[in-house]
Image (cartoon, helix red, strand yellow):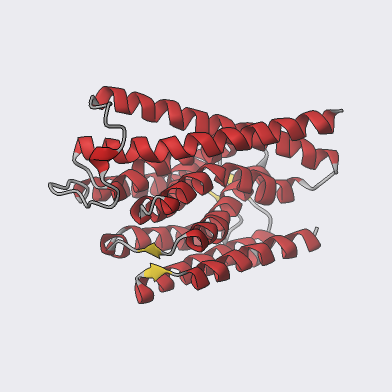
Amino acid sequence: MVLLVNSAVLILGLVLIILSSDYLIKVSVKLAYLLRLTTLFIGLILIAFGTSLPEAAVSITAVIEKHKDIALGNIVGSNIANLGLVLGVSGLLMPLKIDRSLLKRELPIMLGSALFLYVCCLDLVISRFEGAVMLAGFIIFCALSYKHSSSKDLPGETGETQILPSVKSKTAVFALFIVSLSLLVLGANLMVNSGVKIAEFFKVKPWIIAVTVFAIGTSLPELSASISAAVKKISSISIGNIIGSNIFNILLVIGSASLLRPISLERHVLKFELPLLIVFSLVVALLMWVKKRISRIDAGILFIGYVSFIILLVRGM
């Protein structure tokens, strides 16, 4: 009976995510138009921040309750899921064009944050000082993104004026943004909570739960938002959301969590999960720098890589 109830809640969460993510994209593009900001900035900051809230809630709560496996495993697994699962599925649905400004600023920051996280973990603990450095890097990232976000002539990727034509007030659009984002996060939380209970029912290890169930569950907002953006051919939001979310997860979430309490980790994380995160980051960066796009073949490789990661992880249980 308990398994049946949790399965029903999981399905409810999924439906909620699908419906709210579609509306979130429409509201976000409208907000970008009214604020005279680029859709890339909306994807990098507003949507990335919102879709990173589940990771933040899970990791910070885990640190407070001293669940070190869940705190770090959730972020590492979520970032790998963003690059392999989310970017892979989005690119399979629709080839993604890369905004050139992304290659100059945000992509190097994403790669640098992953490398910095690995260096911080070499002594098997992320200290408060290292957390403070991450938060400082996050503030710099936001400042740089905002500095280059203003646009007098917004790119006509979607015909922004045709989206929600009856809503013209900035306050109303922002309120709709908060509501749709809240529903998206609620749906993700329903899926995570029910997914964890299902995993515990089958007696799965905490680290595996964190890297798989928690990571995939908390990446569902990114997946839904990016898929919706890809289908609507808004590549800047689809890719910006993924890159921005990975930066947020490390610099803001891990930075805040380790500032509250230093995060310790097991040595096996240095041998498999963290190196794989760096490999995924490097592959995505190289594809974007060299090809200036993510083709369906590239997306397929990323998706297969993620599936392989999950298989290897489960086999090593």
Judge by depth and name the residue closer to the eye, 76 or 93. 93
Q: Position of residue 31 (x, y in %)?
A: 28, 35
Estimate the x, y position of residue 124 in percent, counting from the top left. Answer: 61, 56
Name the side, left or right, on which 152 lies relative to 181: left
- Kindly tell me whether residue 180 is visible in this rendering: yes
Instruction: Give the residue at the far bottom of this rendering.
Output: 290
In the image, residue 133 lies at what x, y percent? Answer: 39, 49
Left or right of 70 on screen, residue 236: left
In the rendered image of this protein, does residue 293 appear above or below residue 185? below
Total number of numbered labels? 0
Q: Is residue 65 above or below residue 143?
A: above
**Which residue is more in the foreground, 148 or 7?**
7
* Relative side of 8 to 159, left or right: right
Q: Residue at x 31, y 65 (%)?
A: 103
Q: Which residue sits at x=74%, y=63%?
A: 311
Instruction: Tell whether 242 sits left or right of 100.
Output: right
- Image x and y of residue 249, in percent: 48, 47
